[in-house]
Image (cartoon, rainbow, N blue to C red):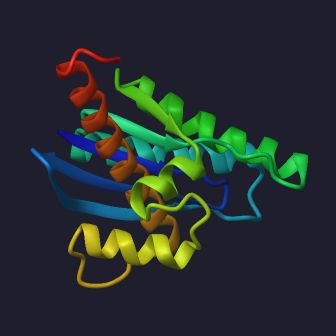
Amino acid sequence: MRILGIDPGTRITGYGIIDVEGNRLRHVDNGIVKTRSSDPLPLRLKAIYDGLTVVLKEFSPEAVAIEQVFMAKNPKSALTLGHARGTAVIASVNLNLEVHEYSALQVKSAVVGYGHAAKQQVQHMVKALLNLPEVAQEDAADALAVAICHANSRTLRQVAINSGRR
């Protein structure tokens, strides 16, 4: 199964693609969609939509996992981040993909084993879990972590279904 993880942001949106083969994770690609902070928000959202649409069409994931918006100290920042997140969801849904959402706590717990882990811990665990030659750019590493979280959650759900629990 191919999973696209997305770490949404209006300045930088990270993406990471992994393949899940049994209990093995394989890195496919990662990167960022960067917008110009001088552009008005609608143009930045269009850039995110267009960039993710290219990634979605090129790599044909079977599922998309995205980080949920957390309530920032600044409500305006949270609202703006919500626009970027919504744009990523729409790009995915327009291609008939299922979108799964995970909190930052869930992502960190799935990757590091501790929900309040530092960003550097997440980056280093992503590098180790995917056998990357170097640590990925921060936003791309976060997106790969979201994809890994979905892969682990999917596996746990399958185990529960197979054992008769839900």
The foreground one among 79 and 22 is 22
Q: Residue furthest left?
A: 22
The foreground one among 162 and 6 is 162
Q: How many marks?
A: 0
Tell me where residue 19 appears, x and y as whole percent.
18, 50
Which image quadrant for residue 119?
bottom right
Please tell me whether residue 143 is drawn above or below residue 52 in the rendered image.
below
Q: Residue furthest bottom?
A: 134
In-image side of 164 versus 123 (left or right): left
Please tell me whether residue 108 is drawn above or below residue 83 in the rendered image.
below
- Residue 63 appears in the rendering: yes
Residue at horizontal 23%, vertical 39%?
60
In-image side of 95 versus 44 (left or right): left
Tell me where residue 15 appears, x and y as whole percent.
42, 56
Indicate the quadrant containing the C terminus: top left, top right, bottom left or bottom right: top left
In-image side of 44 versus 160 (left or right): right
Tell me where residue 34 appears, x and y as whole percent.
55, 63
- Residue 15 appears in the rendering: no
Please tell me whether residue 40 is drawn above or below residue 112 in the rendered image.
above
Tell me where residue 131 appears, x and y as whole percent.
20, 74
Residue at horizontal 35%, vertical 20%?
96
The foreground one among 57 and 28 is 28
Indicate the quadrant containing the N terminus: top left, top right, bottom left or bottom right: top left
